[in-house]
Image: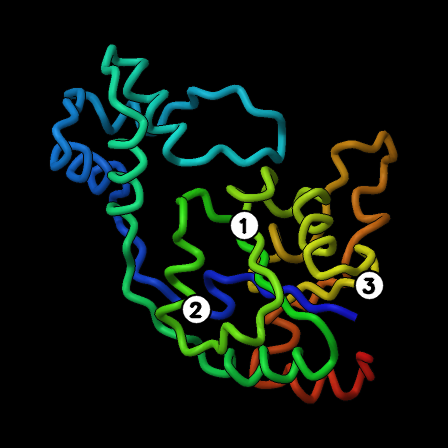
Amino acid sequence: MAVSFDLFGTLVDVDRSSDPAAAVAAALSDRGVDVPDDWASAYRERHIDAPDGAAVPLPAHVSAALASRGVDAPGTAVRRAVVSAFDPAVETRDGAVEAVRAAADHGPVGVLSNCSVPHLASRVLTRSAVDRELLDATVTSIGCGWRKPDRRAFAAAARALDVLIDALYHVGDDPRTDGQVLDRESTADAPDTAGPTHVLLEDVPLHELPAYMEGRAWD
């Protein structure tokens, strides 16, 4: 069996910006990009018509937001601004190190994160106390193209860990994204017919995961 962990709020806590639009605006200005006067509104608007469940990379969203206000910014400048704007301090959550180590004793382990900022997940993991040598894969929405709880996001994690999706255990903190799977490709009424086993921290806290895994005989 394989285990995937959510990243933000599960393995780590980060100091999220209270005003991401302002953070991006400052980073754009630092790189010589003209920021529209109504940037806060432009940033909040939807500019890319993506299918339900699809991930929109934040640089693409920012470029589209600028273009909607007549600003043609170089893609490289936008990408670097986004990466710079989201550079958080990281705190490893209590029990995370032990939980990952215990999961690795039972099979392949990975991270599955809804993350639209390039390289952010890898930077956060590098700054955490989690042993990256124990992680067989890091799958992000920006990398696989789909956001949890879309089934295709969980399927991408399962493929990366070389198991079938119903052999995957997913550990996370958010019932909306980590506690269900939505099969938007299916016409079936039941949204949760084929997917991983969900393990929510509200039911099994991180410090209890090693014993939980041992008791379930994950092997």
Side of 211 where 77 appears, left or right = left
The mark that comes first in sequence, 2 or 3, is: 2
Q: Is mark 2 on a helix, strand or loop?
A: strand
Could you say which is closer to the camera, residue 179 or residue 29?
29
Q: Is mark 3 on a helix, strand or loop?
A: helix
Query: Within the image, what quadrant is residue 23 found in?
Result: top left
Q: Which residue is drawn at 20% across and 21% down?
A: 38
Residue at label 2? 12
Please state which amino acid type lies under the numbered disc 1. Thr
Q: Quadrant of residue 83?
A: top left
Percent from the top left, x then y, of residue 162? Answer: 76, 59
Q: Residues within 10 Å of mark 2 (few under 14, many from 20)?
A: many
Query: What residue does disc 3 label?
Result: 167
Residue 104, position as x, y percentages in the image: 66, 79
Question: What amino acid type should be assigned to the residue bearing mark 3?
Answer: Ala
Location of mark 1 (residue): 140
Q: Residues within 10 Å of mark 3 (few under 14, many from 20)?
A: some
Image: 16 above or below 43: below
Q: Name the spot of residue 136 as percent of width and height, x first.
A: 62, 67
Gap in angstroms between the C-alphas marked 2 and 3: 25 Å
Disc 1 residue crowd, few under 14, some 14–19, many 20+, Cα 10 Å: many
Q: Indicate the quadrant where residue 55 lies.
A: top right
